[in-house]
Image (cartoon, rainbow, N blue to C red):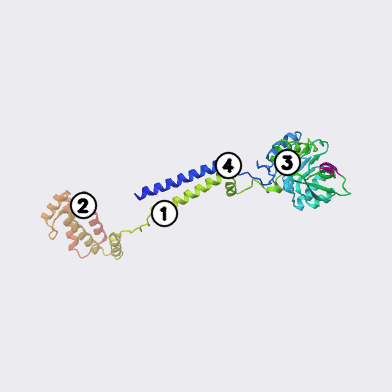
Amino acid sequence: MKRRQNVLIILFVIVIMAVYSAYEVNKPQPIDWSRNFSVDKKSPYGTYILKDALPYLFPEGSVRVSRNSVRERLRMGDCHFPETYFFVGMFFKIDQGDFATLLEEVENGNSLFVSADFIPDTLFSIVGIEEGKRIAQGKDYLRGFEDKAYSFASNHTSFRLRDSFNGEVLGYVNQVENPNFVKVPYGEGVIYLHANPMGFTNFYLLDSVAGDYYQKVLSFLPADENVVWDEYLKSGTGGQHTLFQVILRYPALKWAYVLMMLGGLLYLLFRSKREQRPIPVIRPLENRTLEFVSVVSSLYYKQKDHFAIANKRINSFLEEVRYYYKLRTEELDRGFIDLLSERSGVGRESVENLVNLIVRVRKAEHVNEEQLRELVKYIELFKTKS
């Protein structure tokens, strides 16, 4: 009865977990409105669509997603000249060593495209920009496409240009005096700075009004260059996760892991109730008679007391005769020989030889080794034939 009750409880728990798992899998997933700018995210502010669109915008070059730092890419030889280092995100925070290496690559003929809300002052000072400023209720325009204005958010960011600025304004907010997209030559390469990364997100790429903005922005870049999309500065070395991180990353794997742990816990819980305390093994007492006999006989043998050994063997043999054949052994005469031969099935001549040898040994005062061997031989021969 108790076992049946435990089975019913386990089945009930399994049904509850299955129903809850089905609910979790099929329920509507909440929309992720975070500004992640990740190529792996299909959320509104991810850049999954742009990643798939880049190969069509740069048909003469290759497009790769990099999850390594600039210096690591150079060490691995993952560079195809000429190339455009492409970054879209909220913060362009880069290590000084990587930044110096990146500028050196640009100076040698590569390009740098950065679209971010916050750009470090070190990069601003290189291209001749003081800082960014916010403009409320503005609209974005692109040079050569002034017939269309783009409204992305309530606040827009623009650059303040220094007198030393020797670049070209490609886009602006409301008027040319508020640039938000500039092109600056640097050595043999070019630096592009853009202040509206939201224009590259999934939400605005699917927007009926602003959906062509990213195409017009990227039309200013050479179509024959290789594009390296940087994901390292936003999410680190993505893909290099531990097994546990991968399990928790995907809802289906996470719930499978939770169910497995709950199942294991239930198994241990009910299994522990069924298991009894181990019963210690009590070994039976060993029969050490043979060992005792062996020790005693070896003692007699070492002392070369053949007479004592012979008498021990005779007494043992006669004890077996009394037990198995029910014969009296006080008188070892002809009648004894006849009865022993009849009851044992051994020939009378063999029995007579054995009994005569026993009588001679008993009457002797000394028994040598040869006589002892002969006695043992006749006794064993009798046992074999009987």
Confirm whether the magenta stretch covers residue 172: yes
Residue that carries the numbered disc 1 in the rendered image: 272
Q: Helix, strand, or loop for circle 4?
A: loop
Main secondary structure found in the magenta portion: strand
Separation (CA) of disc 3 from disc 1: 58 Å
Residue that carries the numbered disc 3 in the rendered image: 200
**Residue 189, visible in the rendered structure:** no
Residue that carries the numbered disc 4 in the rendered image: 28
Amino acid type at image mark 3 = Phe
Q: Residue furthest front?
A: 137
Give residue 370's position: percent from left, percent from top: 26, 58
Q: Image check: 96 left or right of 249?
A: right
Q: Residue furthest left?
A: 335
Marked residue nearer the N-terminal end (2 or 3): 3
Give residue 317's position: percent from left, percent from top: 20, 57
Q: Which residues are magenta?
A: 167-176
Residues tagged 3 and 4 counted as in contact (Cβ below 8 A): no
Amino acid type at image mark 1 = Ser
Marked residue nearer the N-terminal end (3 or 4): 4
Q: Nearer the viewer, residue 257 or 364?
A: 257
Residue that carries the numbered disc 2 in the rendered image: 382
Amino acid type at image mark 4 = Pro
Residues tagged 3 and 1 counted as in contact (Cβ below 8 A): no
Q: Image check: 71 left or right of 248?
A: right
Quadrant of residue 366 within the rendered picture: bottom left
Separation (CA) of disc 2 from disc 3: 109 Å
Separation (CA) of disc 2 from disc 4: 96 Å
3 or 4: mark nearer the eye: 4
**Residue 257, visible in the rendered structure:** yes
Q: Helix, strand, or loop for circle 1?
A: helix
